[in-house]
Image (cartoon, rainbow, N blue to C red):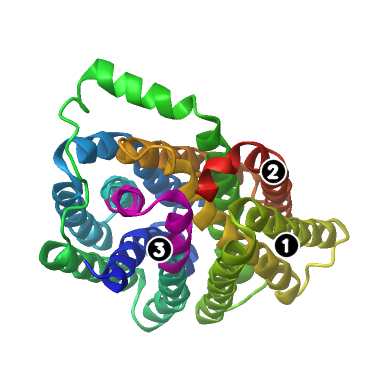
Amino acid sequence: MRPGLVVLMLSLLLGLQPITTDLYLPALPALTAGFGAPMSQAQLTLTALLLAFGMSQLVWGSLSDRYGRKPILLIGLSAYVIASVGSALADSMALLIAWRAVQGAAMGAGVMCARAILRDLYAPAEGARVMSKAQTGLGIIACMSAPLGGLLSDLFNWRVALLALAVFGACALTLMALRYQETAASRNLRALEPLSLLRNWAAVVRHPTFWAFSLLSGASYGGLFTFLASSSFVFIDVLGLSKTHYGLLMFSMSAAYISGTVLCRRLLSRFGVRRAVAIAGILTLLGGTSLGVLAMLGLHTHWLTLLLPFCLFMLGHGVHQPCGQSGAVGPFPQTAGVAAALNGFFMMLIAFAVGTWLGTHMDGTVRPLAYGVWFWSVIISGCAWTLVQRHGHGSEH
């Protein structure tokens, strides 16, 4: 497969995650009001999706090591399309939550395979560069997701916004079916045997490089998810913005992320993985601390005082995610599926914890969003300046 085609495929597969979470965010307050449900149930449509997403990767990872990436991709993307249609037609909040959980499990196949395909084709250092290109594509998808969701919700309703996910899934499924050529060089025939499975998992979780980069990518996603899960309520209900205006704000946030992935490639070529991550940690801490301090001083009365500091955080996120995700699977060329799955599972555990915390701490102010991002920015920069520097040497080769 040509390099451009590989980047396009990785972008679509990784893009399943932001489009599935971001596109319906502008519709979340209207959806919640339409069902007459409390905010805690609305958060469950996101947290159930992400918990199923994380758990499913543990299964998909070993299956892809055993049978190859392509059959797992075709099964997962087909299920994603079905679940997207089911979500759009749900007639109760409980049914919507159930379909979103199925959608999350199906999404896990695509995202996990993308990370495994990257390790199938590239060594760790080159993998970080290719991943940054794919994450630029992911950023473009994220850029379009919230504005499109806001527009569809304003012009039609939230069901049409959710139906758009089925169209995206069908496009990805068609491309994979027609153009993807298997990248797993060999099948691990014992990948599903319980003892072999446990040995593979143990080998991954005992590796310090895996944890250094998984903590980096997990904490960075924790900061992003804090914003995603609370921002629609903060900007629309607290600050009084329209759904379309909110979608445009999310567009600018995604544009900052795309700039971060471009910065990532520049830093990688000049400094290597470890120093690139350390430099990005400065941006992350500056953005998160600005958010937290402004909230502490009660100065978050305008949307710009939230958005500008968070754009700094997103610049750092554009470096931490490509380096973190590729670095976590780098030491495991033979069990890339398992390593990618455990990395993804860990990220989603963090997201589930964040969603659960927000469900009980949203208080009609900007403080939970601001303090949450501040907390994760401290964890990210600490990890970038210590663990990655100590254990990230394998990512430079």
Residue at image location 25% in from the left, 49% down from the top = 106
| 108 sits left or right of 287 in the view | left
Picture quadrant where residue 310 is located: bottom right
Magenta residues (range): 110-134
Q: Secondary structure at mark 1?
A: helix
Q: Secondary structure at mark 3?
A: helix
State the quadrant of the N terminus: bottom left
Give above or below for 189 relative to 250.
above
| Mark 2 in CB contact with mark 1 (< 8 angstroms) | no
Spatial separation of the CA atoms under disc 2 and disc 1: 13 Å
Give above or below for 394 relative to 162.
above
Q: Which residue is mark 2?
A: 379
Residue ranking furthest to the top? 195
Identify which residue, 385 or 292, lies in the foreground: 385
Q: Which residue is mark 1?
A: 283
| Mark 2 in CB contact with mark 3 (< 8 angstroms) | no
Mark 1 or 3, closer to the camera? 1
The disc placed on residue 132 is none
Q: Which residue is mark 3?
A: 34
Name the kind of residue labelled 3 in the image. Answer: Gly
Residue at image location 35% in from the left, 49% down from the top = 119
Spatial separation of the CA atoms under disc 2 and disc 3: 38 Å
Can you give x and y, in whole percent of width and height, for residue 256 in the image? 60, 73
Query: Which mark sits nearer the N-terminus, 2 or 3?
Result: 3
Identify which residue, 187 or 339, lies in the foreground: 187
Can you give x and y, in whole percent of width and height, for residue 191 in the image? 22, 28
Q: Secondary structure at mark 2?
A: helix
